Structures are given as structure tokens and as C-alpha cells.
Image (cartoon, helix red, strand yellow):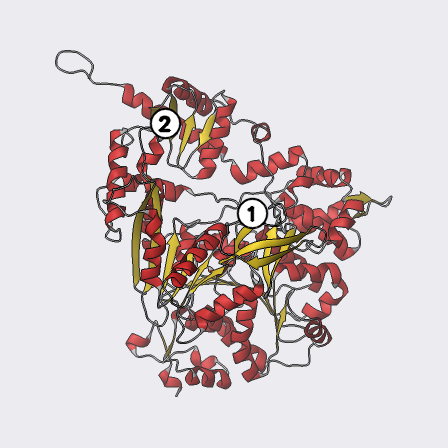
Amino acid sequence: MANLLRSSSESSEGRVSQAFDLLHPKIQKWAWTNEWQKLRMIQEEAILAILSGPGEDLILSAPTAGGKTEAVYMPILTELAAAATDTVGFKVLYISPLRALIDDQFERISEIANLVDVPVTRWHGDVSGADKARALRSPAGIILTTPESLEAFFVLRRSHLPRLFGSLKYLIVDELHAFMPSERGRQLQSLMNRLDLVIGSSPRRIALSATIGDVREACAFLRPPSNEKARAIVAENIGEIRIAVHGFVSDLPEGESSVTRSEDIPEVLYSKLRGGNNLVFANTRQGVESLSDTLRRLCEKRNVPNEFYPHHGSLSKDLRKHAEAMLKKQGSPATVICTSTLELGIDVGHIESIAQMGSPPSVSSVSQRLGRSGRRDNPSILRYFVTEEMPDQESHLEDHLHLKLIEVIAQTELLLAGWCESPETGALHLSTLLHQILSLICERGGITAKEIWTVLCSAGPFRNVSQDLLVALLRQMGAGELIEQAPSGILLLGRQGERLQSGRDFYAVFFTPDEFTLISPAGSLGSLPIRYPLIPGQHLIFGGTRWLVESVDLHRRVVMLHPSPAGKVPKFAGGGWLVGDEVRKRMRQVLLGEDVPRYLDACARQLLSSGRRAFQDAGLHEASLIEWGGDTCLFCWRGDRIRFTLKALLSGEGLQSDAMAVALNCRGSSKIDLIGALEAISSKSAPNVLELASKVSNKENAKYDGFLGKELLDAEYASRVFEIEGAKQEAGKHVRSESERSDVCLDSSGEKQ
């Protein structure tokens, strides 16, 4: 029967899969039972690499539902089943960004692991104490956890670490792309390095991801600083993709019928999605609540069962699980309106299509979301819903370009070209370094500055932090009573450090704000940040339902709700995202071009035509400095890091500017003023980045930034946002361009044209 299974890369040639014969007989039988006809390419190569390869680290990249989980666990379980079972300790450590993903993977992995008697353990905040106690008594097989729970092992169970992980063979990081650019990713790198030091060995590292922009960066992230011996196995997405972009216009005058109104979006969603299983990404929790409420009321108005459910991080686990269960329920259509909570690979069954409200944060995010649909050999379907305002004579030039639509087109073209972003890797991550210093002191009871340098910086993930910068950070932590130094030189927790360490949210390096718990007659609905004002008698939309606030207990931080016919969407916490160079450059190409993408509907085509006409009329096809309404705009069509750096540099030259969607709007400045400032920027030596950053307000971004002090916060901001050399080159480019445009030709009469 093994001959039924062939490698997808070889099946056309009729060759039997070499990898399948390496698997444990019971795992082979499981594949036959599940009617596998062939191994996918990534499974074929991963099995061979794990069971027959030289033991190098691996990066596996394949679309969502591309078989990555089985590609890793089938060979690893084969190896574990054949190994001696008398050694105590977990053999595989799986790290995931989400508890829900751990729960999902636990079910999938256990189905195969039970066949070969390999235990699988979940370990996160929702797992019972009894289950954790059993795992501590008899650690074996596979453990699935989050970075925060692994951090807690170091702080609370340091003496158990050698016994629990001393025989570890594999460390698996799932959804690698979700970790790479973040504070949480740097925490994960630190924990992997610290684990190696504790157990005295380095298990093989394997990473899984649906979207990787730069394979070399991914390999380097998995084992800093370069990981040149790592191997990447990348499967191309060869499935059919169907994309449609629906354009809408807001604030239309009465009687205007040539374009589609934004008020019609719920009706369009209702007509296109009802009766199927879909995901609608609304980008924000406010958007999720507003759209869920509107679509639910449409169902009520038409006397049909509701098929639309909200899903975001502030909702209770029960409400999120209910939405996921409705998607999986056979014969019961459901559409879930969500944020990025359902972007990662949680199994929600067969999804027919994805709807995206406006543009998502990145091309990588588009790819991840699109991959949620199109399983079982069906096409992947993505529908964009883009709303533009109708500009008037008072509107800014950017409003006439319809840049929301242009960004969606640019992202789509890059997606179809197979491109996605690479993470920014230059940030210092001083907030996370501060946290890891506190954690390291907790782990060891005390530590010297030299040991901190060795573990975290010179041989750890914070290699871009110099000794002088580390010393400055330690001094700042001492001044803030986070740490104190014993006469022997050992660093210990200070009064404030002990307070932080004892907090329930210490193990996370991301913000966990104080919140109200919202209680309805049926139970807990979720939570809202405590800074959101709630008073009795107030109306609220939450969980896609309308509520009246009956009472607010400030001491217990509990809000009692009662159903109501009225409601208002609350404001949630959350910020924006940085857009990179390639998207901005492609946006300009879209406006310069003449081709009209086939995936645009009539309204989107009209908006594109209007935007291109405004682009040409303003002279943006040949110029980048445009005078508009008494100001001068610099259209540099570069990523946000370059634009924000230019904004700071212009401020240093006395020009105040506003960062708009793609341009810098220099208030009250003439074109001559702006050219002079750009010339000065390009010709001067690189400025002091700390002095430049000191002029920026609201720099706190990460959890512990408030403890850094002014100079360290300036250094952190500069490393995360500024790109000095790129901005200087950009300034020089615009000066040269304006100079070339001013070299006018003479006509036959000798007059300037």
C-alpha cells in the first residue's frame, strides 16, 4: 500500500516516495486511513531532512494548510518511537504565539502521537494545575507552550529545567513570521539561548511559517547571528487565487449614483457571504464590533438566523470559541468578523473566502489571510472593500489620489508577484533587554554585569547593544530601584524590580493593560481597557450585541450589562503599523501606469482613473515637490522609516511638517524653503541621532520603555524608527531632481520654455 503515496514533486514521473518508507508503520497506516494519495513536496523534503539529513536547523515555509505540521511531526514521532524511553524529560519543545493555536495543534499532534505512544503536553495559563503537576512528575514526549510560559519556567522552576529539558532533541517555533519583528521575538531568542546554557546542549531548531520574506533573515533569527548551516524548505503556493476589489465612496451628495456608497458595504457583505463560511478581517476591534452589530441586525430585520459572529482579543474565550465552533459546524454557514486573531493557523474548518476591509498591515498579512481559504483544492478567494472620501476644493492633494485604493492595488500586485516584507532587524529592544535582565536575576538569584553581557549581549540575541549602552541601562535600572548591587558586585532585584517580578503579567514583554471585566446575564463577555470610561446608563456594543451598562464596580473592576436596543462601539487600545519601501514605490507605479487590473469593480476602476488624473494634473508624474494651499508637499514615495526620519531632519532645519499617508506636508513653507532644507540635509554630515530623537514626543512604544530614562529611550526610538543614511540619500535625490527640472530648454526664439 505504500506505493499509493508518492511525493508531490515526483508523482508526475511515477516514482515512489523515498520519504514515506522512512516513517513508522503506524504513521504510514494513519496516512492511508486518512486517504492520503501523496506526500506534499515540503513533507517529502522535511521527512528526509529530519530522518536522513545531517541534523541542521530547518525553516519550513508553506501556505496555511500546506502540511507543515505533519511534515515536522511525522518524522519526529517516528524518531521518538524508535528511541529508548528510559530517559526522563521532554524531547520536543514546541513554542507558539497563541494559546488557541497550541490547543489546536495539541489535538492534531495527539492524534498521530497516540499511535506511537508518545505523550503530548499543553502548558499555558488555561491548562489546569493537575495537568501541569502530572507533566512535572513525568516529563516526556512533546510539550507545547508559549514564550511567556517558558519564561515562567526560568523564574519559578529554575531547578527543574535540567530535568525537564536536559534530554531535549528538538525546539520547534511555529508561526515564525509573527515573532521575528517584535519584542516578543527578541524574548524568544533570549529564552532559546538561555535554555541552551542551562541544559548544556543545543537541540535542533525547526521553524514553521506561512510567509517568509527573506530566508536568510529567518535562519539568522532562529539561531543568531547567522546560522549559515540552516536549511530552508520552501513550498510555492500553486493554487488558484481569485481576487476582487470593491470600491465605495463616503459622504456622497444625495442623488449621486455613479459610484457605490460606503453605507452599502454591509448589504454587499450580506449578499456575497451569507450562506457560506467566510472570514472578514476588519483590522480593528472597533471595526469588528460595528460590522458584527450591523450584519446581525440585518439578519434580524429579514427574519433569518444570524450567521455573523465577532472575534477579537478583548472578547472572552467562550465567545471566541463559539465563533470558531460555528465555522467548523457542518451544515451551518457562518461568517466571522475578526482582527488578526484568526490570521494565524488555527483550524477553523473549510473557509470559502476572505473579506478584507481596507488594506491590511502588510503584504505578508495579506498572504497569511488569503491562505485561510482555498483548502481542499478549491480556489483561494479574497474580496477587498475599500472606502474613499469624495474630495472637494478644500481637500488636500492626497485625498484626490485615492491612496487607500492605490495601496490595496500595490499590495495585491506584490502578492501576485510572490513578494512579502522582510522584518526590520536593527532595533535595540532595550525594553525587552531590561526585562530579560530582571528574569535572569530571578533565575540565578543574582548575577554580575559581566555575566549579563555574556549571556544576553556578546553571545546572546542583543548583539547590537554595546558595552557602554548596557552599562548605561544597568545604571538606569539601579536609579529606578529595579536592581541593586551587593558589596560583592552581584546584581539583585531592587524594590521596584521585586514589585514587577511579582506581578501576574511579568512574563509577557507586551502590554497587558488593566481592564474591566464585562458581565452579562449569560456570563462573561470579555474585557475593556480600564481607561475607557464606563458609567451606569451608558450604551455599548460588545460581542456584536447591544448592551446597557447597569453598574460599574471600580474596586473589583467589574461591569454589569443588560441587553439593550441601543449601543455604541467602544474605543479600544491599539496603534498603527509601519509601511515599507516596496509598497510605497509600487503605489507610485500604479498611479503612473495605464493598465487597469481586472480584479477592480466599476467603482474601484472609476476611483483609480480619478486618482491617476489627479496625479497627472498635479505634476506628480515628473515632480515630487508640490505647492498646495500655502504649504509645500514632499512626495517621496518611500517607507515610513525614511519619511519619519526626513520629518525629524526637516524639523532640525526649521521646517515643521506633518506626516500624511505618503507625503510630508511642510506647513507654511515655499518650495524654495524646502529645497534649501533638503540640500542642507544631504550635504551635512550625519546628525546625532540621539539629539534628533530627543525632539520627538510620545516615544514610548514597548512595555518597559517608561523605565529607560530619556537618553536610553532616545536611543531605542532612533534604532527602531530612524534610517539616517537612507533619508540623506532621499533628500539629495529630490534636490537633484528639482535642479534638473529647473534647467529649462530654449525654444527657437531664444526664450525659456
- Residue identified by numbered label 1: 573
Question: Is any part of residue 381 visible from this angle?
Answer: no
Is there any visible trace of residue 576 in the rendered image? Answer: yes
Question: Left or right: 563 with respect to 737?
Answer: right
619 in relation to 483, above or below: above
**Which element carries disc 1, helix, strand or loop?**
loop
Which one is nearer the viewer's eye here, 243 or 274? 274
Q: Amino acid at mark 1?
A: Ala
Q: What residue is shown at x 12% (from left), y 14% (from top)?
A: 748
Looking at this view, name the residue that lies furthest to the bottom: 1
Instruction: State the SS at label 2.
Output: helix
Nearest the eye: 478 or 540:
540
Quadrant in which the C terminus appears = top left
Residue 21: x, y in percent? 44, 82
Residue 478 place in picture, x, y as percent? 77, 40
- Residue at 56%, 82% in the rendered image: 114
Furthest toward the left, the residue is 748
